[in-house]
Amino acid sequence: MRIWYLITNPIILDFIDELESFGQQMPDVIILMHPYGGLQFDFNKKELAHIHSNGLLDVLLSKKLKAQLLFEGRISSHHVFPKSGWISFYIKNTDDLVYAKKLLSLAYQQRSFKNMS
């Protein structure tokens, strides 16, 4: 599928690469292959988020934060687990990439705060 996007929408792959670089700068975050394709961002061996090769970013947040972000209207409930804290967000342009970095940062902050408690 990545090859398809390389041909039809190569900018998406650039956005994924940039998000990967952003995630690599976060302390204790490792990036690996997601079991269903794409990249997975883990913090202390627990998944924070993953991104599919079509630019769909799935992020695990608290249900409270998810509700706030849903109200703002930029994200949607996860396409498979809608009642969980998981959210989905498509990266289509540079503004979306900035927002995706914010979402990844929020997940990181929540998880790192939990580890401090």
Image: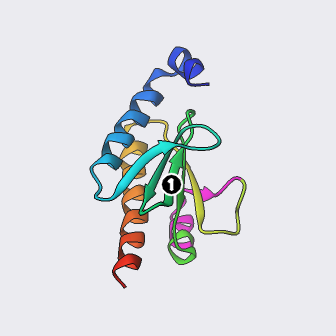
Percent across and percent down for residue 33 are 52, 40
Figure check: 1 above or below 97: above
Q: In this image, 28 relative to 64: left or right?
A: left
Question: Residue 73 falls in which quadrant of the image?
Answer: bottom right
Residue located at (70% from left, 69% from top): 83
Q: Element type at marker 1?
A: strand
Figure check: 74 above or below 72: above
Mark 1, other Cα within 10 Å: few <14 / some 14–19 / many ≥20: many
Q: In this image, 25 relative to 3: left or right?
A: left
Residue 73 among magenta residues: yes
Residue 38 among magenta residues: no
Q: Quadrant of the C terminus?
A: bottom left
Percent across and percent down for residue 62 are 53, 73
**Span colored in magenta:** 67-79
Query: The disc labelled 1 sits on which kind of residue?
Result: Ala
Residue located at (62% from left, 44% from top): 35
